[in-house]
C-alpha cells in the first residue's frame, strides 16, 4: 500500500519545476531600464537627467557598482523620481537583493502608478519568492498598462506568469479555465513557444484531458526529440495512467541521451518497480549513491529493498530518515513492518503505537499494531487495534483470524467461535495452516 505512493509523490516532486513558474520569473527581472536597451531613444523622448542616463549606460554594461552609486546620489535628492527608483530596483534585483528590489519597485509604483515595468518586475519578483497572492495583482495590473518601449513581448510575459499562478492547485478552488485564458492572451500578442505548449499540455492533464495532454507533449517531442521537460512530463503522465511498458521504453531511450538525470532515473525505477522487475533495485542504489541526502530517493530505495527482502538494509535507511523526521507516521509504519519481518515484535509494537498516536487514521499502523500485539501475546491490545482499524476499512481473512485467536486467548468462547467461522468463510483455502488451526479450535470450542 505504501510502496507505489512514495514513488508517485517523488515523481511529482521532481517534476514540480519542469513547467513551473520559475520559467517565467526566476532568471531576470521583468524589464530592463529603457535607456539601457541598445538603440533606444528613451533619453531624448523622456528628457531624463544626465545622472539617470549615465546610470542606465552603466546598467547596459552590467556595471552595477557605478550605476548604483549614481542612482543613489540622484534618488537622495529626487526621492519621487519613478524612473530612477525603478532603475535602482533593477540593479538590486539582478544582484539578488530581493528585499531591496521589492521596496524600490514599490516606491517606483507609488511615484508613478502607471509604470508597467515596475508592476511587472515586482510581480515576477514576488512570484519567485513564492508570494503568489501578492504577485498576482501586480501582474494583473501590468497586463492592463501600456508597455511602451518594452513592447508586447513583456506584456506576454506577464500573462504567462499569471497562467502559472492561476494553475489549479491540489485542494484549491481555482477556476480551471483561468490559466488557459491567461495563456491565450499571451499567444494573442507573441508567438507560441515550446514552454507554452508544455504548459497547455500540463493544464490539459490537470483537467483530466489526458489524450489532449499526450498529443501536446508528443508535438513538442516531434519538433525536439531531446526536450527533457517534454520527456519527463509525458513519462509522468504515462506512469500515472499505468502505461508502464510504454513509459519504460521511452525512458530507456531518454537515459541514453541524459544518462545521469535523476528525474528520468527515478521514473524508470518507478516503472520497473511497478512491473516487479529486479533491475529497479540497482538503479535506485546508483541514484541514492549520487544523491545520498535526498530523502525522497532514500525512501524509494528503502521501500524497494524491503520488497526485495533486505529488511535490515532497508531499516537502516528508515532509521536515518526517522532521525530527521521522528514524527512521520509513514516512516514509523515502514520501520515497524521491517522490524516485524526481523521478528523484533516489541520494537515493532512501539513503532506502530507511535504511528497511530500521531495519525489515528493510519490503517497500516493499526494493522501492524494488531499483528505485533498478537505475537507478543497481548490479546486486549490486539482487539483494541482491530477495533480502531475497522473504523476505516472492512475486515479481511487475516483480521478475522486475529480477532478469533485473541478472543480464544481471553476465553471468550462465543466470540472466538464466531470469528473462526468468519475466517474460514473468507479464507477459502488461501491460508491452509491457519485454516487447519481454526478447524481444530472450533472442534474443541463447540464440544
Image (cartoon, grey):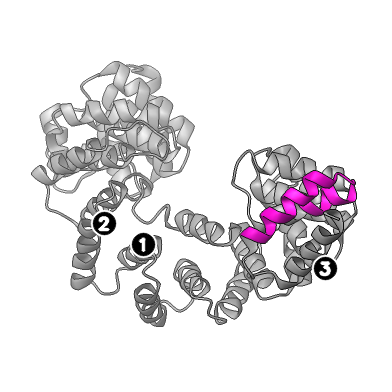
Q: Is residue 49 visible?
A: no
Using the rendered view, name the quadrant where residue 78 is placed.
top left
Front position among marks 3 and 2? 3
Which of pointers 3 and 2 lies earlier in the amino acid sequence? 2
> Percent position (x, y) of residue 49?
24, 27
Q: Is residue 301 above or below residue 129?
A: below
Give the spatial CA distance, label 3 vs label 1.
35 Å
- In the rendered image, which residue does mark 3 sit on? 342
Q: Which residues are magenta?
A: 403-425
Which of pointers 2 and 1 lies earlier in the amino acid sequence? 2
Task: Please tell me how crowded label 3 is: few (under 14), some (14-19), or many (20+) other residues with Cα within 10 Å.
Answer: few
- In the rendered image, which residue does mark 2 sit on? 210
Left or right: 47, with 69 as reference point: left
Q: Is residue 202 visible?
A: yes
Using the rendered view, name the quadrant where residue 106 is placed.
top left
Q: Quadrant of the N terminus?
A: bottom right
> Percent position (x, y) of residue 8?
49, 58
Question: Residue 415 in magenta?
Answer: yes
Left or right: 349, with 102 as reference point: right
At mark 1, the secondary structure is loop
Q: Quadrant of the C terminus?
A: bottom right
Near-viewer residue (100 or 390): 390
> Percent position (x, y) of residue 224?
23, 71
The residue under the point 37% across, 65% down is 232
At mark 3, the secondary structure is loop
Q: Is residue 138 above or below residue 183?
A: above
Question: Residue 209 in magenta?
Answer: no
- In the rendered image, which residue does mark 1 sit on? 241
Secondary structure of the magenta portion, mostly? helix
Amino acid at each position: 500500500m505504501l510502496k507505489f505512493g512514495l514513488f508517485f509523490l517523488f515523481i511529482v516532486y521532481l517534476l514540480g519545476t519542469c513547467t513551473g513558474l520559475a520559467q517565467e520569473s526566476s532568471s531576470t527581472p521583468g524589464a530592463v531600464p529603457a535607456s539601457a536597451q541598445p538603440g533606444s531613444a528613451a533619453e531624448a523622448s523622456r528628457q531624463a537627467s544626465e545622472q539617470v542616463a549615465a546610470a542606465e549606460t552603466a546598467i547596459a554594461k552590467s556595471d552595477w557598482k557605478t550605476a548604483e552609486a549614481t542612482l543613489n546620489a540622484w534618488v537622495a535628492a529626487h526621492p519621487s523620481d519613478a524612473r530612477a527608483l525603478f532603475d535602482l530596483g533593477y540593479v538590486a534585483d539582478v544582484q539578488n537583493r530581493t528585499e531591496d528590489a521589492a521596496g524600490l519597485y514599490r516606491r517606483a509604483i507609488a511615484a508613478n502608478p502607471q509604470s508597467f515595468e515596475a508592476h511587472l518586475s515586482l510581480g515576477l519578483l514576488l512570484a519567485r519568492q513564492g508570494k503568489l497572492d501578492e504577485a498576482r495583482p501586480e501582474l494583473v495590473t501590468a497586463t492592463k498598462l501600456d508597455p511602451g518601449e518594452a513592447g508586447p513581448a513583456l506584456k506576454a510575459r506577464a500573462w504567462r506568469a499569471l497562467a502559472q499562478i492561476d494553475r489549479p492547485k491540489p485542494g484549491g478552488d481555482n477556476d480551471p479555465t483561468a490559466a488557459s485564458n491567461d495563456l491565450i492572451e499571451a499567444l494573442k500578442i507573441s508567438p507560441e513557444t515550446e514552454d507554452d505548449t508544455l504548459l497547455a499540455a500540463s493544464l490539459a492533464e490537470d483537467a483530466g484531458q489526458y489524450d489532449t495532454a499526450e498529443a501536446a507533449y508528443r508535438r513538442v517531442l516531434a519538433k525536439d526529440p531531446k526536450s527533457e521537460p517534454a520527456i519527463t512530463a509525458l513519462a509522468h503522465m504515462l506512469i500515472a495512467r499505468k502505461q508502464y511498458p510504454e513509459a519504460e521504453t521511452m525512458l530507456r531511450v531518454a537515459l541514453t541521451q541524459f544518462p545521469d538525470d535523476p528525474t528520468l532515473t527515478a521514473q524508470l525505477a518507478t516503472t520497473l518497480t511497478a512491473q516487479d522487475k529486479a533491475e529497479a533495485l540497482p538503479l535506485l542504489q546508483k541514484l541514492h549513491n549520487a544523491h545520498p541526502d535526498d530523502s525522497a530517493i532514500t525512501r524509494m530505495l528503502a521501500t524497494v529493498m524491503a520488497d526485495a527482502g533486505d529488511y535490515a538494509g532497508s531499516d537502516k535507511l528508515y532509521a536515518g530518515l526517522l532521525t530527521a523526521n521522528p514524527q512521520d507516521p509513514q516512516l514509523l509504519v515502514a520501520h515497524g513492518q521491517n522490524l516485524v519481518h526481523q521478528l523484533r515484535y516489541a520494537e515493532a509494537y512501539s513503532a506502530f503505537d507511535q504511528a497511530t498516536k500521531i495519525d489515528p487514521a493510519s490503517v497500516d499502523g493499526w494493522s501492524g499494531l494488531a499483528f505485533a500485539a498478537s505475537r507478543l501475546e497481548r490479546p486486549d491490545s490486539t482487539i483494541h487495534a482491530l477495533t480502531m482499524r475497522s473504523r476505516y476499512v472492512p475486515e479481511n481473512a487475516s483480521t478475522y483470524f486475529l480477532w478469533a485467536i485473541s478472543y480464544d486467548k481471553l476465553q471468550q468462547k462465543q466470540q472466538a467461535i464466531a470469528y473462526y467461522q468468519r475466517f474460514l468463510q473468507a479464507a477459502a483455502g488461501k491460508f491452509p495452516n491457519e485454516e487447519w488451526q481454526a478447524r481444530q479450535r472450533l472442534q474443541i470450542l463447540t464440544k
